[in-house]
Amino acid sequence: MTDAEYEEVKGQLHQIINEWHPALGLGWWDISLEHVRDEGVFDGGDDEARRNPGCVARTQTQWEYLQATITFCMPRLHGRTYEDLEEIMLHELVHMFVGEMRDCMRCDCGVDKFDVKHEERVVTQLTKAFGSTRTHFEKPRANREAGPFEGGKDAA
Ligand SMILES: [Zn+2]
């Protein structure tokens, strides 16, 4: 990856987080971004990285202090569309909301039975939900998809 390619991806990531972190109400968080150019360094980071080869980004939180570090594997992000980068960033930001659940599960069981797939499924679902609100509310109200809502019955 050339310096120019690195700077291009980095600029896109910063543009995306500038837009999304206030939209998600994350202004109280202290968020650091790290950009790793060496895939070997990225993969050698921790157990989570080793369990998930080919991973493009990861988020570590000190949720009790509202601090997070998002680390990007820059060579793996190069060549992706802006929309892909946006989804990746959104996914990592959503990890900040649920990071404390991981620690709770770890300390409860004594043994590391934690399966990150549960967290990933929740994060993936929330990423799609947040992402779809953007396209939904970009449309004029009259053109938004709407369906009958069957709940909200009157109490007797
Ligand atoms: Zn994830």
Image: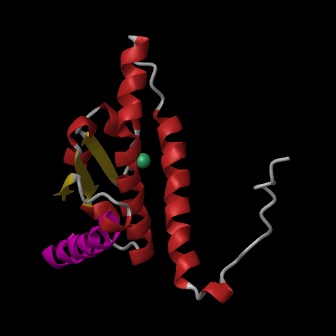
| Image height of 82 relative to 115, above or below | below
Is 146 displayed left or right of 60 in the figure?
Answer: right
Is 85 displayed left or right of 64 in the figure?
Answer: right
Q: Position of residue 14 (x, y in %)?
A: 23, 71
Query: 113 and 147: which one is in front?
Result: 147
In the image, which residues are magenta? 1-21
Query: Which quadrant would residue 80 be assigned to in this image?
Result: bottom left
- As drawn, which residue projects farthest toward the top? 110
Query: 86 and 3: which one is in front?
Result: 86
Magenta stretch, main secondary structure class: helix
Q: Position of residue 146 (x, y in %)?
A: 72, 74
| Image height of 79 relative to 46, above or below | below
* Residue 107 visible here: yes
Query: Which quadrant would residue 86 be assigned to in this image?
Result: bottom left
* Residue 81 visible here: no
Q: Position of residue 133 (x, y in %)?
A: 54, 70
Query: Which quadrant would residue 142 be assigned to in this image?
Result: bottom right
Query: 11 and 79: which one is in front?
Result: 11
Q: Position of residue 52 (x, y in %)?
A: 40, 41
- Residue at 49% x, 58% y is 127
Query: 13 and 98: which one is in front?
Result: 98
- Residue at 40% x, 61% y is 90
- Residue at 38% x, 46% y is 97
- Residue at 78% x, 55% y is 151
Is 80 displayed left or right of 11 in the figure?
Answer: right
Q: In the rendered view, how is the structure colored?
A: secondary structure
